Amino acid sequence: MASESQRTTDHETIRRWAEERGGRPATVKSTRSGGEPGVLRIDFEGYSGEDSLEEISWDEFFEKFDEKDLEFLYQDKTADGQPSRFFKFVRH
């Protein structure tokens, strides 16, 4: 079923999924410390993260992703077949 969630740690899969939906790697501004990213997010244009999120490079994003031993839980398509933006970071 297309609306089922999938998990991955593959950087290219995550990057491609995000970019196909207009997403960019970001960190929550208030959690950034000592020049390192804090809580990771993917920021989609037109959503409410504008004031609280700061765009970071994919390199920074994946360095923190790996350091925190995270997995990317995501949905490729919604139940009606549209591209989904559902995702979540979970402990690996």
Image: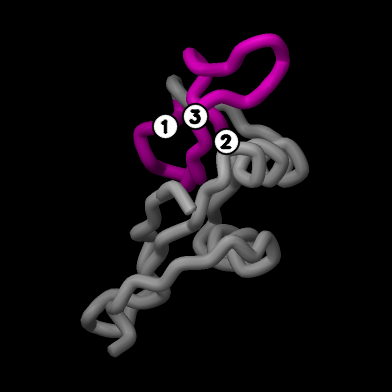
Which callout, 1 or 3, points to the residue nearer the camera?
3
User: Looking at this rendering, what residue extends furthest in the right direction?
Assistant: 59
First reached walking from the N terminus: tag 2 or tag 3:
2
Q: Residues at badges 1 and 3 in contact (C-beta under 8 Å)?
A: no
Above or below, 42 relative to 27:
below
Cα separation between marks 2 and 1: 9 Å
Return the mark for residue 26: 2
Under circle 2, the secondary element is strand
For residue 33, above or below residue 2: above
Instruction: Decide: is 15 above or below 89.
Output: below
- Residues 13 and 42: in front is 13
Is mark 2 in CB contact (under 8 Å) with mark 1? yes
Say if mark 2 contacts mark 3, CB within 8 Å: no
The amino acid pointed to by label 3 is Val
Question: What is the quadrant of residue 47 in the picture?
Answer: top left
As displayed, is residue 58 above or below residue 7? Answer: above
For the record, the magenta segment spans 26-50
For disc 1, the marked residue is 49
